Structure formats: C-alpha cells, structure tokens
Amino acid sequence: MNRPISRRGLLLGGAGAAAAVAGFTIAEPDAEPSTPNRKPRPVEYTPVTVERVRSRARGRTVHLAITRPSGVNPERLPVCLLLHGLHGNARGILPRLAPRMATSMNGGALTPFVFAALDGGDNYWHHARLTDDPMRMLLDEAPAWLAERGFQRTPFAAAGVSMGGFGALLYARRRAERDDPVRAVAALSPGLLLSWTLMRKRHAFTGAPQWADLDPLRHVDALRGIPTGIWCGTSDPFITGARRFIAAAHPEFTHLAPGKHSTRFWNTCVPSLLDFLGKYAPVYGADRPGGNPI
C-alpha cells in the first residue's frame, strides 16, 4: 500500500533534513511540435510515495520510493533510478522539490519521467555479502516492480549521490555488459577514491582486488558511448577522484563549482541534473501507437 510522504518530506542526500515536496514542475512534451508558439504547460510532481517490496537479491524487505509527474497518464512513463549514499536510504534520497528547480525544466518541452529509489544498504551497491546483492536487485528485480506500477520496465537512466554515484556508474557498466545500456548516467560527488587505505575504512569490499574490479575509475572504457554527467564541489573530499574520472572519461557534462560534500551543494546541482536527464529520456508515449501521451 502506498504511503505518501508529508510535504516536509525529502532532501537530496543521505540522511537529509526536511524539505518541501510540492512545487516541482517540468514541461509537458509538446504534442504539436509544428506550433512553435505554443508554450509548454507545467506539470507538477506528485508527493513521494513509499512502498515495501520483498527483495530476494537482498534477502530482506526494502523501501521503494517514487515520485512522478501529476496530471500525466502514468502508463509507460520512463524511469530514472536514484541511488542513495552511505548510511542513506530510499526515503532520504529523492530530490528536493523546490520551485526554483522548475525553472530549467520549464524552459523547454522535456519529456516527463519518474524518479524511483530503493534501499541499497552501505555496500557500494554491489554484492558485498553472501546474501545481500543490491546490484542484482536493481538489474533483475526493479524492472518487474516498475512494470507492475505501470511505468516503463527498464530504467532509461541512473543517478546517484556519493556512494550512490559510484553505484550509478557501476550500474551503467553492468547494463552495458548486458548489451542493454542506459541512455544516461549521472553522478553527484561520486565516491571515487584513489587509495585502498581510504576505501578500506568503508568496510564495503572484501579487499583491494575486489574494489579494483568494481571501481569506475579503473573501468572508464566500460562507459564509452554512454552520456555521462559528473557534479562535484571543489571542497569535496571526492574532488580528486571526480577530476581523475573527468580527465579519463571526458563526460558529456561536468559541473565543478565551489561547494562541499553537502546537501547545500547538491541542491544547487538539481536544475542542471534534471536538464541532463531530460535530454536523454525517451519520448513519453512514443511506444504506444496512436496514443496521446498526456
């Protein structure tokens, strides 16, 4: 049963503090592109809902948090997975939905899409423990959960913060290895470290070899051809790793600006994050012949 989060709901980040949920709008895709003077009509996002689903991959019940455009037929809406950071969860990761975030979206007729978040634990979104595999949950279980709720089965993109940024890049790699690449991947302050001594403190890997096997910095070629965005504050402890990734991967979008590893910085990134994801989202309703998507 869906349980709506209050209007003092969720922040972009790990634990997060309270923030407004209402007021976020995106542009309705123009059903008549031949009329250039027609302005996109804003579409508000629904309050976040949270459900409990049983994950066999993780060996436990997890939370599935979703926010989607209101006033839009939910059938076949595209989905972006949103991965939380260390010590976070699905209920604390969804973007802060403030009116200023709508500005960039209302500048053009970007297709609406869903944000979906799941509890992934603290193991950097990989199979760190024998009975706990959050990556398999994302790859093999999440599609069915999304389809059951009427959305497109396969997420078109993944985004994440901190540990979730590491996870989003790893998810994009795994999708590419399955010959089913994402359309885009976005990482905010991705948890990329250059030293096993530093990474070992997170107790997420069995040893340096496993970390090296999964570290996106060591597998940049796996994301070739996948539109990638990287955001990081210049005072963030992960800035060195972010710069190293940018230099090696040459992502389509980068945003390095004054800021720390904090929700204050991440919230400033949300408008450009939405623009980036919206650019690569599949055209809503295009796969439903003869149907009006709105």
Image (cartoon, helix red, strand yellow):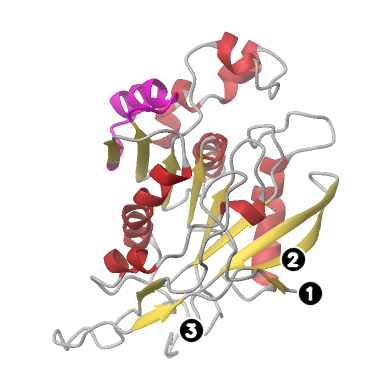
Q: Which residue is mark 2?
A: 51
Residue 143 tag number? none
Q: Amino acid at mark 2?
A: Glu
Residue neighbourhood size for the residue with mark 3, other residues' Cα within 10 Å, grouped as few (<14), some (14–19), many (≥20): some
Mark 1: which secondary structure? loop
Q: What residue is rendered at 39% in x and 43% in y?
A: 265
**Circle 3 is placed at which residue position?**
72
Mark positioned earlier in the residue sequence (3 or 2): 2
In the figure, residue 223 lies in which quadrant?
A: top left
Q: Relative to residue 32, is residue 18 drawn left or right?
A: right
Disc 2 from disc 1: Cα separation: 6 Å
Residue 58 lies in quadrant: top right
- In the picture, the disc for residue 1 is 1
- Which region of the structure is painted magenta? 234-253
Q: Earlier in the sequence, mark 3 or mark 1?
A: 1
Whether 133 is drawn above or below 234: the answer is below
* 90 with respect to 97 (left or right): right
Q: Is residue 39 above or below residue 152?
A: below
